[in-house]
Amino acid sequence: MLHVDLDQFIAAVEVLRHPELAGKPLIVGGRGDPTERAVVSTASYEAREFGVGSGMPLRIAARKAPDAVILPVDAEAYTAASAQVMATLRTQPDATVQVLGWDEAFLGVQTDDPEAYARRVQAAVLERTGLHCSIGIGDTLVRAKVATGFGKPRGVFRLTAENWLEIMGDRPTVDLWGVGSRISARLAAHGIATVAELATADPAVLATEFGPKMGPWYGLLGRGEGERVVDDTPWVARGHSRETTFQQDLTEPAQVEAAVRGLTAKVLEDVAAEGRPVIGLTLKVRYAPFITKTMQRKIAETRDPAVVEAAALGLAGRIEPGRPIRLLGLRAEMPMPEKAREGHTPTRSGW
């Protein structure tokens, strides 16, 4: 199986639209104004040399790379470019395509020479779209995904059971797909700092720390094991979320209430398009200067906007009074349909 990952996707799309920016430090984020509250969506390799990275506040990125060109996010352009890439992948011989997002997908293929196949895929994507990609080859989805990082940029790399521990064994667990900084810290508290240590960790210790399902799953990740089938069943979202960063902190209860009502209305529009009810809500609050908290609650299955709004406002009632708020987000969970893809692919999940 192959993991195809477009190199600096958003920045690359912008360079295609603005060829004069090729080779220059480029940052894409927010409305392109570093004086506003926004974060970096992507940075070109030239901008990354200055220490600019995704998720960094735009004002800090502008300070690190003062000569960088900063552009606003144009989601429609990236969606169109992504559609072209995925259509190209689907034309590859005998390929099963599992889309992971705008800029990455798995390909399940039958070939005696996966490196040559991967190079042909790279050439096809470049010819059709003008975009470069890196490709990881693996005998599991996890190994293919991790392999891509070794191939960047524009390269091909293979990770299998034979070389997994040789390549990955001494690396920190946070380098694994599906292990973020929090999980890595919890593993470290048990003396599990490297991939090799996770691969040989006591299953009972992992189960005690993470539960009977997730504990063994982390052990599998350490060994690079997991799903070996690329599944092209359309992905069904478990929920929809919206969030807003405020240019001025919210300080009054009425402001918070209005913002939560607005977010609820937007999320309900997304949920309505799915045709499924709401069964849970998560409210995300970022207090100034940058402290983030989340609050959750399950609700009885409902399609009634008034019920969902009341539940969201109930969560908002748990916000600490008197603390300035710089961001609010709301996520609505939905029940999964019977024919949804079984299981899941490990990811560094969002909130």
Image: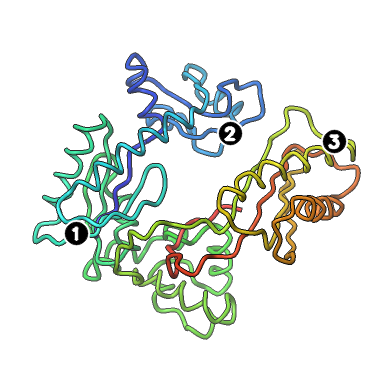
The x and y percentages for residue 99 are 36, 51
As helix, strand or loop, the secondary structure at mark 2 comes to loop
N-terminal of the pair, mark 1 or mark 2, is 2
Spatial separation of the CA atoms under disc 3 and disc 1: 53 Å
Distance, label 1 to label 2, CA atoms, is 37 Å
Q: Quadrant of residue 227?
A: bottom left
Nearer-N-terminus badge (3/1) = 1
| Local secondary structure at mark 1 | loop
Between discs 3 and 2, the one toward the N terminus? 2
> In which quadrant will I find the N terminus?
bottom left
The numbered disc on residue 39 is 2
Q: Amino acid at mark 3?
A: Gln
Looking at the image, is mark 1 or mark 2 nearer the viewer?
A: 1
The amino acid beneath tag 2 is Val
Image location of residue 332, percent across then percent down: 66, 54
Query: Which quadrant of the view contains residue 262?
Result: top right
According to the picture, the residue beneath numbered tag 1 turns out to be 109
Farthest bottom residue? 204
**Of residues 164 and 119, which is closer to you in this image?**
119
Residue found 47% across the figure and 83% down from its top = 202
Label 1 CA crowd tier, 10 Å (few <14, some 14–19, many 20+): some
Q: With 94 as the anchor, is 347 left or right in this view? A: right
Q: Which residue is mark 3?
A: 255
Query: Residue 302: x, y in percent?
Result: 71, 61
Q: In the image, is 239 to the left or to the right of 170? A: right
- Residue drawn at x 82%, y 53% is 310
Kind of element beneath mark 3: helix
The label number, if any, that marks residue 64 in the structure image: none
